[in-house]
Amino acid sequence: MEKSSTEKLAKRITLVVTHQCNFDCRYCLQKHEDVSMTKETAIKSIDAFASGIVEGDKAQISFYGGEPLLQKELIKELVNYSCEKILSIPDTRLTFEITTNGLLLDEDFIAFAKRNKILLALSHDGLAQDEVRTDRGGNKTKDRIDEKLQMLLKTFPETIVMMTVHPDYVDRIVDSLKFFRSKGVKSVSMVLAHGERVSWDDETFEKLTREMNKVEALYEQWNAGNDVFRFIPFDNKIKNYIRQRDADSVTCHFGCHKFMVDADGKYYPCSHFIGRDGFGIGSLEEGISEEKLKDLESKRVEPEDCKGCALRFRCRHTCACSNHGHTGSMSEVSALQCEYEKLTIQLADRAAALLLNESNPGFVSRMYPI
Ligand code: SF4
Ligand code: SF4
């Protein structure tokens, strides 16, 4: 196997610290085997990553699961070890990222996150949480996670909430956003649940369209004057347009600048492909296989139907994991995803046309940072 150069590992890496989870979400596609990363594998992963960091770099390490906070003590050790190792290189900056379901968050870990520049994002499905995201015992979780959200917001007022929309609860999107805003949340990311455990049809998409139109009205209202409410799907589409960057360069890191190390030390190009046959791109022992990476990249081609589409630079139609999740192919966009992309771009543009004027300084400065 051809070994990669160390810079292939820089500058962002994700460690899958466990496959286990204390939740049992209705759309989850993971198997939750009793597998966790050993300290030895974790340290080797950090060492391999650190070997590609040079003076002046900005490095980022993410911890992923299952539920990563089941490995809280290991994460603390790794954060301390990474800081010692990487911050000794002159002028480097190091940040960490964890998305958690929140159940194991406590004041102590939040204070640790604050001290060590760990960005904590919280998965929360709003008013569908109790129906969709139960714990392993089948118990509702909303009240418990709401408390954790309040705890997080006290220390991190900019906490991002990650909401997944299950087709059975599409009509709760607007009320969920209102709920988050009433709690003080300023940033909500949203994705549509996909995979074999959910099914979307014309009727649910019509409901989604109605909800998204209402979201647009709220977005305009909540970003008026100096107010700030980041609905990430709209924010991203507007920024893509303003900065003239294609959507995937912002959202899809498939095999470039970011790799996943699974609990057993194998490398994958993106979280969606962890443990899937044919998607491994190497291991800690062997390094990244350029050959396998190139082979995977060659299978990720732009769909014919998209080549003439006016929206192609703002659409995530080449995002390998999104396509694979919806259609089973890295290069085939589902009808749902295509319609959702069109809808999101149209609504984001309408909102931007209204908000990009001087009477909304919060929105203008967010879109045009100095
Ligand atoms: S919290 Fe995440 S990993 Fe756990 S069951 Fe839910 S979706 Fe799956
Ligand atoms: S909007 Fe649809 S047709 Fe256009 S690029 Fe996206 S997926 Fe392809």
Image (tube, rainbow, N blue to C red):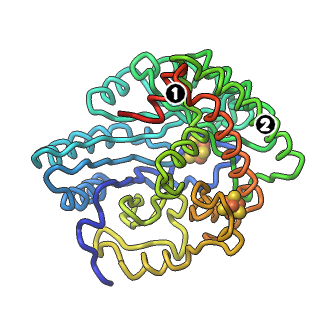
Give the residue number, with chain letter if any, for mark 1: 363
> 270 above or below 135?
below
Q: Nearer the viewer, mark 1 or mark 2?
A: 1
Q: Position of residue 226 (x, y in %)?
A: 51, 17
Front residue of 370/341: it is 370
The residue under label 2 is: 169
> Residue 267 falls in which quadrant of the image?
bottom left
Q: Quick one: 52 or 307, which is closer to the camera?
A: 307
Quarter of the image where the N terminus is located: bottom left
Question: Is residue 92 among what the camera can see?
Answer: yes
For the residues labelled 1 and 2, the Cα–Cα distance comes to 30 Å
Amino acid marked by disc 2:
Tyr
On whether ligand 2 comes within 8 Å of the CB at mark 1, the answer is no
Amino acid type at mark 1: Phe
From what the image shows, is residue 148 above or below residue 93? above
Characterize the local packing of mark 2: few (<14), some (14-19) or many (20 or more) Cα atoms within 10 angstroms.
some
Q: Which mark is residue 39?
A: none
Question: For residue 265, what is the image quadrant?
Answer: bottom left
